[in-house]
Image (tube, rainbow, N blue to C red):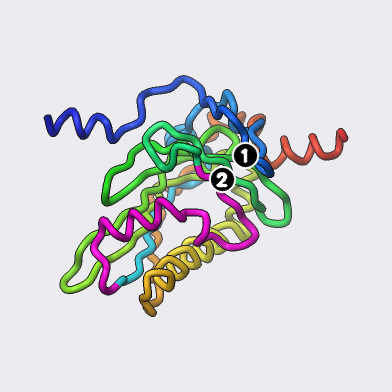
C-alpha cells in the first residue's frame, strides 16, 4: 500500500507537455508540446544550490500546505506564477511570466513530485535552466526549516552567458526573497541562508542546439513580428 501511495506522488511519464487552458495573462506557446529537461539535457555548468530559512511554530506539513496554496505570492513582483487549476499536484503544469535579465520571458514548470513535506518542479525545453527544483520542509531541533534545493544547469549558450553575467546572483536573490516572504507570512523573522556548489565545471557542447528552443528568443521574435 505504501508503494502505491509513493507512486501516486510522482508524475506519470510524458513525452511532451500538455498545458490545457491558459490563464488570463499567461502564455503557453513556449511550454505546450515541449519536452522536459533534466541536468543531462542542459548546456551550462551544473550547480547544486540550497536556500534555507528557519520557521518557528509551524510543522513541516503546515509550511508545505501554505507554500503550495500560495506559491506565487512569495515571488518577487517582477515575476508571476500561474498555478495549475488543479493545484500543485504530480503531472500538473504551471506557467511563468517574468524577466531573464532585461528581457521578458514566458515559460513554465511541471510538478514532478509532491507530498505533504515537499514538491519538485522539472523544467521544459526553452526554460533558462534544465533541472529540478525541490521545495521542502523538515524539523530541526525545536523548529522547522523551509528549503529550496536546485540541481540545474543553463539550458543553452545564451542563458549560460546571462547566468555568468547576472543570472547566478539574480537567482540567489529570487529564492532568498521567496523564503523571506514565506517566513514573514508564517510569522518568522529569520533571514534565509544560501549555499551553492559547482557540481560540474564542464559545458555540454553536444546540447548547443538547445538554443533553438530558447523561450526568451521565441518571445522576442514574436513581439517583433506583431
- How far apart, in angstroms, are the residues tagged by discs 1 and 2? 7 Å
Look at the numbered disc 2 and give the secondary structure of its residue: strand
Q: Quadrant of the N terminus?
A: top left
**Which is nearer the N-term, disc 1 or disc 2?**
1
| Numbered range of the magenta stretch | 56-83
Q: Residue at x 35, y 46 (%)?
A: 119
The quarter of the picture where residue 128 lies is top right
Inspect the magenta stretch and tell me whether residue 66 lies in it. Answer: yes
Residue 86 x, y percent position in the rendering: 45, 37
Q: Please rate how many residues cluster around mark 1, counting C-alpha atoms within 10 Å: few if below 14, some from 14 to 19, many from 20.
A: some
Residue 174 x, y percent position in the rendering: 53, 62
Q: Please rate how many residues cluster around mark 2, counting C-alpha atoms within 10 Å: few if below 14, some from 14 to 19, many from 20.
A: some
Q: Quadrant of the C terminus?
A: top right
Q: Residue at x 77, y 41 (%)?
A: 220
- Residue at the extreme top: 15
Q: Name above or below for residue 131 compared with residue 183.
A: above
The quarter of the picture where residue 190 lies is bottom left
Q: Which residue is the site of mark 2?
A: 82
Q: Residue at x 67, y 46 (%)?
A: 105
Check whether the beta carbons of the residues at disc 1 and disc 2 lie within 8 A of each other: yes
- Residue at the extreme left: 1
Q: Is residue 5 left or right of residue 98?
A: left
Look at the numbered disc 1 and give the secondary structure of its residue: loop
Q: Which residue is the site of mark 1?
A: 23
Residue 160 x, y percent position in the rendering: 59, 47
Inspect the magenta stretch and tell me whether residue 194 lies in it. Answer: no
Residue 157 x, y percent position in the rendering: 62, 41
Amino acid at each position: 500500500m505504501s508503494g502505491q501511495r509513493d507512486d501516486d506522488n510522482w508524475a506519470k511519464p510524458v513525452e511532451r507537455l500538455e498545458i490545457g487552458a491558459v490563464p488570463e495573462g499567461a502564455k503557453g506557446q513556449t511550454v505546450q508540446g515541449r519536452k522536459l529537461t533534466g541536468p543531462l539535457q542542459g548546456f551550462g555548468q551544473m550547480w547544486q544550490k540550497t536556500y534555507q530559512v528557519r520557521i518557528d511554530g509551524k510543522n513541516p506539513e503546515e509550511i508545505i500546505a501554505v507554500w503550495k496554496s500560495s506559491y506565487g505570492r512569495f515571488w518577487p513582483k517582477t515575476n508571476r506564477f500561474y498555478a495549475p487549476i488543479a493545484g500543485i499536484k504530480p503531472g500538473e503544469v504551471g506557467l511563468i511570466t517574468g524577466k531573464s535579465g532585461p528581457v521578458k520571458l514566458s515559460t513554465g514548470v511541471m510538478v514532478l513530485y509532491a507530498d505533504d513535506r515537499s514538491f519538485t518542479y522539472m523544467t521544459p525545453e526553452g526554460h533558462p535552466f534544465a533541472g529540478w527544483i525541490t521545495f521542502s520542509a523538515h524539523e530541526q531541533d525545536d523548529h522547522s526549516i523551509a528549503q529550496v534545493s536546485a540541481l540545474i544547469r543553463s539550458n543553452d549558450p545564451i542563458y549560460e552567458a546571462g547566468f555568468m553575467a547576472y543570472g547566478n546572483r539574480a537567482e540567489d536573490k529570487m529564492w532568498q526573497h521567496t523564503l523571506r516572504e514565506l517566513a514573514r507570512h508564517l510569522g518568522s523573522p529569520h533571514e534565509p541562508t544560501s549555499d551553492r556548489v559547482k557540481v560540474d565545471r564542464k559545458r555540454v557542447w553536444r546540447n548547443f542546439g538547445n538554443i533553438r528552443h530558447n523561450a526568451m528568443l521565441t518571445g522576442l521574435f514574436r513581439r517583433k513580428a506583431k
